Image (cartoon, rainbow, N blue to C red):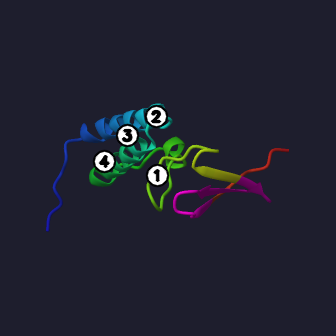
Amino acid sequence: MKDKKRPPSVKPLARERIAVLFSEAEKIFHENPGYSDRYVALARKISMKERVRIDHEYRRRFCHHCSRYLVPGANMRVRVHHGWVAVTCLGCKKTTRYRVERTP
């Protein structure tokens, strides 16, 4: 089965829409967190459909297990321990760890 080719101009448009959705999620989180979660779900759906990676700056702003928009102190707990940052989503209680480089 042959894969459908998309016009090359679709990927930059998808990246732009993902950026807009994350900025809107950040703006509206304190008024209605449900909308923020919906915006993140839409951004993930766009990235999967168009096969575009979500940028590094946005990738750590949502839970990869339940697709919630994460804000430290509100629905996310952050702990630093032995060169790792442990981020716990308080919605689904899943923990994601990120490596941290130490500066001399």
Magenta: main secondary structure equals strand
Q: Which residue is mark 4?
A: 46
Q: How many marks do you count on the picture?
A: 4
What segment is highlighted magenta in the picture?
A: 79-96
Disc assigned to residue 104: none
At numbered mark 4, what does the secondary structure look like: helix, strand or loop? helix
Is 9 on the left or on the right of 96, as rendered? left
- Looking at the picture, which amino acid does disc 1 mark? Arg
Name the residue rendered at 49%, 43% in the picture.
Answer: 58
At numbered mark 1, what does the secondary structure look like: helix, strand or loop? loop
Give the CA distance from mark 2 to mark 4: 24 Å
Of callouts 1 and 2, the N-terminal one: 2
Disc assigned to residue 68: 1
Q: Nearer the viewer, mark 2 or mark 3?
A: 2
- Looking at the picture, which amino acid does disc 4 mark? Ile
- Looking at the picture, which amino acid does disc 2 mark? Glu
Q: Give the class, few, some or many, for how many residues have Cα within 10 Å of label 3's Cα (few <14, many ≥20).
A: many
- Looking at the picture, which amino acid does disc 3 mark? Ile
Is 76 on the left or on the right of 38, as rendered? right
At numbered mark 2, what does the secondary structure look like: helix, strand or loop? loop
Q: Can residue 83 be seen in the rendering of this structure? A: no
Give the CA distance from mark 1 to mark 3: 15 Å
